[in-house]
Amino acid sequence: QVQLVESGGGLVQAGGSLRLSCAASGGTFKDYSMGWFRQTPGKEREFVAGISRSGNYMAYVDSVKGRFTISRDNAKDAVHLQMNSLKPEDTAVYYCAADRNLAGVVRYVHEYDYWGQGTQVTVSL
């Protein structure tokens, strides 16, 4: 059973940056593909970025390509999401997720086994 705890959310002006972190415990971190999702009220949870077990493969939703970077540190059991050039439409609750079945990048909500509690990101004009 993996526990995931996100941190790093907050309020930032448009054009600013935030770095989200997700600390994992209770499992062998390098055995999990990791992802970041986001959700706003009334909408489905959306894939933002994913990273393979090895950290060699990443994928992003089109709307964040060139602005967000996902990375992982298997020695410290952590995954990060560096968010630059933030826009008001990036405002959401951001969730970290772990998948134990697939080695590559995992894009779909239903494929993930474990979720964090979420961290709020608010981007103001």
Image (cartoon, rainbow, N blue to C red):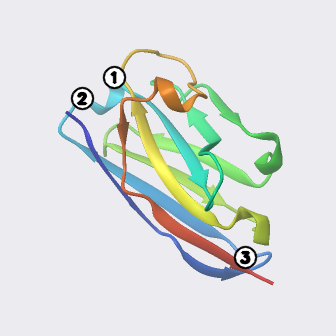
Between 9 and 28, the one lying in front of the other is 9
Label 1, secondary structure: give it: helix
Can you give x and y, in whole percent of width and height, for residue 124 in the image? 74, 82
User: What number is the disc on residue 16?
Assistant: 3
Q: According to the image, label 2 marks what residue?
A: 28
Picture quarter with the C terminus: bottom right
Mark 2 or mark 3, which has the lower sequence index? 3
Image quadrant assignment for residue 108: top right
Q: Is residue 54 above or below residue 120?
A: above
Q: Residue at left 36%, top 21%?
A: 100
- Give the Cα separation between the discs numbered 2 and 3: 34 Å
24 horizontally vs 84: left or right: left
**Number of residue marks:** 3
The image position of residue 25, as x and y in percent, is: 22, 44
Can residue 54 be seen here? no
Residue 63 in view in this figure: yes
User: Which residue position is annotated with label 1?
Assistant: 31
Q: Amino acid at mark 2?
A: Thr
Q: CA distance from mark 2 to mark 1?
A: 6 Å
Query: How would you rate the neighbour count of disc 3 (Cα within 10 Å): few for under 14, some for 14-19, many for 20 or more?
Result: some
Q: Residue at x 33, y 22 (%)?
A: 31
Which image quadrant is residue 21 in? Answer: bottom left
Disc 2 secondary structure class = loop
Quadrant of the frame with the N terminus: top left
Circles 2 and 1: CB atoms closer than 8 Å: yes
- State the separation of the CA atoms marked 1 and 3: 33 Å
Name which residue type carries label 3.
Gly
